[in-house]
Image (cartoon, rainbow, N blue to C red):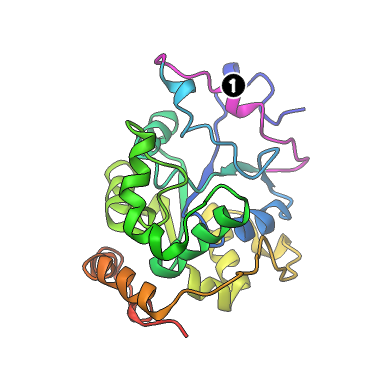
Amino acid sequence: MSLFKNSSSSGKKLDFIIAGTQKAGTSAIHYYLKQHPEIALGIKKELQYFDNEEIFKKGQPDYSLLHKQILQVQGSKISGECTPTYMYWIPAMRRIWEYNPEIKIIIILRNPVVRAYSQWNMFKTKGIMGVDFGDYILREQELARRDLPLQSRVCSCIDRGFYSEQLRRIFMFFKKENVLILKYEDFKVNQLEGITAILKFLGVNPALLKFTQEQVNSSEYTSQMTVKEQEVLLELYKNEIPEVERILGWNCEDWKLIQK
């Protein structure tokens, strides 16, 4: 049974969305929020509604397709979903804003060099990436052209790390007080602090969460990035990282270093 039964008449809409970025801890955030008694989430982690071109190609979307995928939780006060592609998918933020301009957006950002490798490794492990990472770095744009006129969901490991354009798009539609952005490296060190910040942002009681730190969606790498591969990526992001620092007021010096 859906929390949103008869939602078309009640007008009830989602209160928040975890919108990105991929391979930066969204699975952990989703896991912990699912344990909170005042929060209702989707029947699965990624509902992929606002990045579904089939839903939106005919104009006015049927939001009941989204609402019926939200699980009923007795005593819940708010509801949301987690699809980390939304941050990257160009039309998604406008679609979310048109759905609910007051919705709260949660974003977590990771060192783009490390994040790119993590995503490539995920696709490699799943058997849908047949190019070694060193070659992939040189060929991403070529490989991504196969998915035109849409963005590539697979061949975008590097492109997704250009956060500044994505952040500007978010702030184009949403008030800053409706957007919470975390740094993955801080979240990894202290997950409880990060989740507490999210729960306060969402307006639910952090004390109701019985927090036990878990390893969520963690995968082993069959190999590590070479120093040369890191140097190439750092060159690609050399102007991007300072721009993210400027937009968010962050210190990202750790993103500019070769990882050992």
User: Residue 59: percent from the left, percent from the top?
Assistant: 39, 15
Q: Residue at x 66, y 31 (%)?
A: 69
Q: Residue at x 74, y 35 (%)?
A: 72
User: What residue does disc 1 label?
Assistant: 64
Residue 146 sits in quarter: top left
Q: Residue at x 65, y 65 (%)?
A: 219
Residue 229 sits in quarter: bottom left
The residue at the far left in this view is: 239
Residue 26 sits in quarter: bottom right
Per the image, is 65 magenta?
A: yes
User: Residue 67: percent from the left, percent from the top?
Assistant: 61, 28
Task: Work out which quarter of the rendered image holds the N terminus and state it.
Answer: top right
Magenta-colored span? 58-76
Left/right placement of residue 219 relative to residue 110 reads: right
Return the residue nearer the eye: 12 or 20.
20
Q: Work out whether residue 175 can be spotted.
A: no
Return the residue nearer the eye: 74 or 106.
106
The prevailing secondary structure element of the residues shown in magenta is loop
Q: Residue at x 61, y 58 (%)?
A: 29
Q: Amino acid at mark 1?
A: Ser
The residue at the far top in this view is: 58
Return the residue nearer the eye: 121 or 211.
121
User: Residue 120: percent from the left, percent from the top?
Assistant: 50, 58
Left/right placement of residue 10 relative to residue 84 reads: right
Above or below, comparing residue 158 to residue 193 in the picture: above
